[in-house]
Amino acid sequence: MKPQSIGTSLRALVLAVLAVAVAAPQASAQQILLDKLVKAGELTLFPDLNNPSLFYYVPDKVRLATDANGTPQFSFLRYVENVRSGADQAEAREGDGGGIVHALVTLGVSDEQRSAALRELQRTHPGATIQGPILFKSGRFGLVSAFADPKGNLTKQVVGLGNAPLLDGEKAAVSIQLTKLGSKILWESFNMPAPDVSFHFEMDMSGYRSPKRATIDADWSKVYEHKAFNGAIATNMLAAEVSAAYDDLRSTSAIKVTQIGEDEKMNQIVEAAYKMIQERMFEPTGGTGTPSLTDLSSMGHGSQPSLLDRATTRLKEAQAATEAENVRTRAENKDIAGRNDKARLEQGKVAGATFNSQLAEQTAIDAESEAVIAKRRAKVAAEELANAKAEPAGDDVLDKAAKADPAELQKQVVALQKAADEAQARATKLRADANKLRGDAALATATAAPTEASKSEKAAPTLSIMASLQIKKVKQTGTFHFDMNKYTPENLTLPFDENIGDLRRLKNDASHFRQVNLDDPLFKQRELVAMVDGVSAQDFGQFVNFVSVQMRKKHASGEETNDEVRVDRNNFNKEGNNFKLLYGWKGDDDRRRWMEYEVQSTWSFFGGKSVVEPWRKANAGAINLAPPIRRRTVMLDGNVETLQQSEVRAVTVKLYYDVAGSEQSKQVTLNVAKGQIAEKLELLAPPDHTQYAYEITWQLKGNRSVSSPRQTTVSDILYVDELPATSASGALPASR
């Protein structure tokens, strides 16, 4: 049954805007340090830039979302179309075809995982708290399936690439068109006893890198001359291929990463350098990063393999590299375990020596106490003997009788003095023994090696592989220089994998798995899947009101079928970015002509502006709705010392850009005192519009300010440390 097209009521629109008003500040409020990653329990955590005791976790535990009945929200349509061979062609043994996969996935962690992570985190970071999940900016995914090759061996193949638009509630919608081969491999995979089908996610998050004493330099002319980029304007490249080319260019010094001093995280510096150069040189394929079916299956530049085959190769290489690194990690952990056994043995000796030392110390103290008591007794006895020997005064017979026998007392004094001498000798010996054992314990403690923590193995490749890129039409010129000795804004890509699981119980349910022959006479209606690409839930309400897609089908009978779907934030979340259009059979005897239809999209942006795209012909089973404008990143940079010498306390940058004929603006203030003068601003523009305007205001000491006039540029980077020679009132105020 065809779902109804859902319009947006005024109340729903107001609620959606309010939802964005709440969500958007949360996203912008997450200023995290990307190079201070902490592992706690099963979670990956990043600290807040301004509060080191505040952490955010990565919601990387993926599972298929379920409906109210607990059924996975997953569907796979495989279709085939009969093909008649030409007179001069070999007999056609199979038709054309393809497939469409749609799924909703949940990105999150359980309460138990979060609680366990907090307990472990607080052991190493007392007083730390976990604020909540990191809000991803965008995401991509590859559908990876295992199948039996001609030799019977299982091999993995990337069967599809696409975006993962983010929905509200820590969910993502994944919709993908498959080639004929990809749909065949995937269908057969689900027939296996233990299906090996997984999503390879690459989710993007934004944050800051801590200051590093390193610089990045690139000679653009040499970079563009690399063989990998010669034909890249006419074809697509994968992010992994771009990184490999940058490795070559770094070996020839066309790209230089210069480190001042020592830093054990050199790999992170190089990765950040490549990311900066890539952002200036490339843009997502088609503005969204989703390649077409033709791009996926056709041969690349210079008869290179198709994009899917190259993605498969790169994924295998990355997995092999990850496994090789894990082999080294396991070997290192084995050595660490051996050293820890030795260390624990030594620590056991330390514990024994410490115990013996403490026991000897207490024994010596007891002996010294006994010696003191023995001496006191001997002294008392000697005093009594002296009194006994003294003559009593007068003839007091009773007094004489009270006197002890001196001879007997003399024996007691001798015995007590001997006991006191022996007690003192014993105490002296025990004290010497205690001192020696204390020294032995101290030496054992000083020489005992501490135990080491085992290194963690990587569960997935750490590089972005699935991103599909194309070279920007406007090339960079001259040289690129960037000083990393400041907090640097950056986008970090986090890859992780998740197996879809065994869905064989759903194979006989046509709402989840369906095969159709488009030439079957019983196939009398056609359902088209429309999916929004390159737009997330937060984009609805921030700059997009809605997108409306109209479909019209002109039948052979002369009749016309029309259908329409309108997508806003409300039903984008509700339907999981899975919308349906439908037309039927009305005297269309020519099956191939029956597959053809026309489609038109209308995008409504904030400010009351709309872009109506022209009608276009199509015949695919899926309609990709990509916005007519694209995101563009402008990097703000400068030298802190230069600004401080000019007595600049803060810099405010305002960008102006056009969206469907309506001027929009974005503004950011940079804090010079904190060294936070590198920042990124995102603006929107049509693919062929590279120009934007900007104004810069420098706030000086004494509440003075200097502003630049409004200027235009096409550059992807703005330097904010070049103050104008004069202020609006004349000469620039002198430094004081």
Image: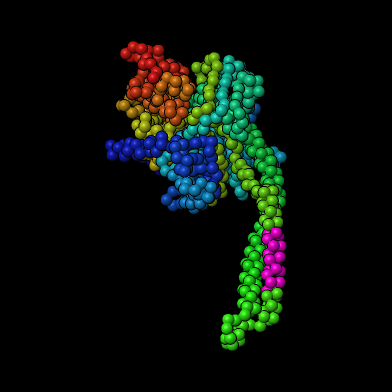
Q: Is residue 491 shown above or below 496?
A: above
Task: Give the position of the N terminus as an image quadrant.
Answer: top left
Q: Is residue 381 shown above or below 327?
A: below
Res. 258 image quadrant? top right
Q: Residue furthest front?
A: 394
Relative to residue 111, is residue 364 drawn left or right? right
The range drawn in magenta is 416-434
Q: Position of residue 114 (x, y in %)?
A: 49, 49
The residue lying at 69 percent from left, 41 percent from top is 328
Res. 143 image quadrant? top right
Res. 227 image quadrant? top right
Q: Nearer the viewer, residue 156 or 387?
A: 387
Task: Give the position of the C terminus as an image quadrant.
Answer: top left
Relative to residue 580, is residue 465 drawn left or right? right
Residue 332 lies within the magenta run: no
The residue lying at 70 percent from left, 59 percent from top is 432
The residue lying at 33 percent from left, 23 percent from top is 703
Q: Nearer the viewer, residue 736 or 491?
A: 736
Relative to residue 234, is residue 663 drawn left or right? left
Residue 628 visible within the image = no
Q: Position of residue 580 (x, y in %)?
A: 42, 37
